[in-house]
Amino acid sequence: MIARIGGFTIAGGSKGPVTLAVGDGHPATLVEIFTAAEQRARTSQAYVRSALGARLRVERTDVAPTDIDPDAVTLLQRDALTGLEVTSVLTLSGSALRVQHTLRGTASEPVVITAVSSVTVGFGAGPQAGEQYDLLTARSEWLAENRWHRRPLTDELPSLSLPIHAQDGRGHATLTSHGAWSTGEHLPVGALVHRDGSALAWQIESGAGWHVDLSQGLEGLSLSLLGPTDLEHQFAHVLRQGDEFLTAPVALAASSSGTAGLGGFERAIATLTSHRRAIRRVDGPDLPIVYNDFMNTLMGQPSSEALRPLIRAAAEAGAEAFCIDAGWFADPETGDWWDTVGEWVEAPSRFDEHGLRGIIDEIHTAGMRSGLWLEPEVVGVSSAVAKTLPDDAFFQRFGVRVREHDRYHLDFRHPAARAHLDDAVDRIVREYGVSFLKLDYNINPGAGTEWQAAAAGDGLLGHIRAFGSWLDDIQRRHPELLIENCSSGAMRADYALLSRTHLQSTSDQQDYRLYPPIAASAPASILPEQAGNWAYPDAGMTDAETAFTLVTGLSGRLYLSGFLGELRASQRELVAEAVALHKLLRGGLATTEPFWPLGLPAWDDDVVCLGLRGQGESLVFVWDRSEDPISFTIPDVRSPETLFPARPAADRWEIESADDGIRIATGAGLGARVLRVEARVEGAGA
């Protein structure tokens, strides 16, 4: 059996396991399975050459009649020794190859799974193949998300003269998440770029542990993408007779060089972008402009007195939703709200005689949706809920509750935990008329929970999947409810969750000068129409600095904060102009593809640039963070039209077309622009 789908070749038969390769790469075993009883058939540190995976044989295939762009390929393989069955489904999703396996136990003896590759794909040919590739990955942390780096693959996998030993290499290059902050250290998105410009990009859709594993063999290179594993995530799962286990879904995008005028990397990211749209379970191209009272504003200390001027100013600025952030449930006399979360009942002492309902009524009267902040998966140690819910409803390790920064972590597999949050959300929607929820996630509970699990990582996976199911149920009961996924900014921004939510806050970064590289890089891993970029004008800013933070907001979903009522008239005009422009542009965001004319930005770059290529027009967002006048050229675009700020700003930019692109000369001080441009048919890669 040989099938081709999305630039990948699937092969298999009675003499060996199913293999997957991209381009002219060597075929690699599609699914590698490691158990407590058996790991590798030949020793290595990489997730390849598993003993069980090598024994798999095809029992049934369901391949589309033509191998040109088939809808799906379904394969059933079986290991005769353990009786383990593996059903693999490979589908085209927005031109990306999506792969997921179901493992099923059929024998009387249980099989303890310790790791499964969601996909293993071969690429490159020969023992020196790594010399032809660069590796692109992104580090991420609180306040410094989406920091992409490009480096030769040989920096990670050096050339080893393997033919002398006539053996595959034993090392590997890896990226791994830890705990439940799936994007807290690295993004589960990356790419390999060949020197000819072609690229292979990937995305792992798991909030409960993931692992990227690259290795070099005699025949070529292998990329294994995995969900949680024993070694990295304390994971194990028992498959008894009739039990099934579903792997984390992954997506692969292959791109040849120069496709459609883009470099291979950008084309592959465009393919992943279309895949992300294809798997979304919620719509939201016209998501309202949200004002939130947290960033550089109330910082978790709301009250009737503090909120009223913010509500008036937000409505005057054109915001369409007003979200009251953390603290609305906490008595200000008892100290910080951090360890009191979990009951989700308003604190009367924060509000006047009309209570929280009175403030929310004022939001509605001002013509805006109302929103509230929740952190549904945690309970503070000082919350009454910590005493009323049973121990089994919380994460547990070694017989005790897991405690992290004065909070316990709920397990959404437990009916009492889920019922508590069901009641809280239903009550909030019913009693207050709230139609926007900001769901935060501010702790990392570690490996997971051992309750009803073979290992802690298994419990974490079960919880994350139950939490996703809870989100689905909430939106079935309340279809009008818009949900933001926030996790200390973007510490858990994977598409297991983002496929279920409308908006993702891209950062908690409060320094407007540091935000541009975060916002500009976000579309590599988050849909532009979901990327909530904060803009928080302040009365102490110059007009140019005000425009600077607003350009950041406009480069995705404009997300407002700040004391807007204290702004000067000229600043208020800029805010109104940005809001009006966003309302014109937002409908087209859901059809754009990102590109980076100056390359993916480094954290300390003076000039940062993001492009969004649309069907009818393209947009370029440019930030100059240098304090001195500079000149630069943006290649592969032309015919610039300044959309924001519309009137000449004090930062004095000069913008003109040139044969090689757009030439920009800036004045002293920070500055930023939104440009409408024509994107050239042929251009350079990332």
Image (tube, grey):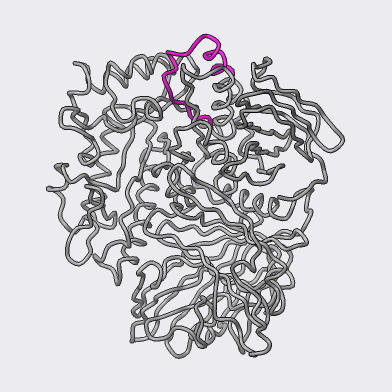
Q: Residue at (69%, 33%) from the top-left corner?
A: 619
Q: Residue furthest left?
A: 387
Q: Residue furthest top?
A: 569
**Is residue 78 something that shows in the picture?**
no
Number of numbered tags placed on the structure image: 0
Q: Measured from the top left, where is residue 394 in percent x and y?
A: 22, 55
**Is residue 100 something that shows in the picture?**
yes
Question: Is the residue 125 above or below the residue 140 in the image?
Answer: below
Q: Is residue 172 left or right of residue 562?
A: right
In the image, residue 575 lies in the stretch drawn in magenta: yes
Front residue of this view, candidates 96 and 556: 556
**Which quadrant holds residue 635?**
top right
In the image, residue 349 lies in the stretch drawn in magenta: no
Front residue of this view, candidates 363 and 227: 227
Front residue of this view, candidates 82 and 633: 633
In the rendered view of the protein, which quadrant contains the N terminus? bottom right
Q: Measured from the top left, where is residue 315 in percent x and y?
A: 44, 16
Q: Residue furthest right?
A: 659
Q: Measured from the top left, where is residue 543 in percent x and y?
A: 57, 17
Question: Is the residue 284 above or below the residue 107 in the image?
Answer: above
Question: Is the residue 241 above or below the residue 671 in the image?
Answer: below
Front residue of this view, candidates 342 and 293: 293
Q: Is residue 606 left or right of residue 236?
A: right
**Which quadrant holds residue 224?**
bottom right
Chain part drawn in magenta: 558-577
Question: Is the residue 352 above or below the residue 294 in the image?
Answer: above
Q: Residue at (51%, 54%) from the top-left corner?
A: 187
Q: Is residue 305 left or right of residue 155?
A: left
**Predominant secondary structure, magenta span:** helix
Q: Measured from the top left, where is residue 654 in percent x and y?
A: 75, 23
Q: Residue at (59%, 33%) from the top-left corner?
A: 555
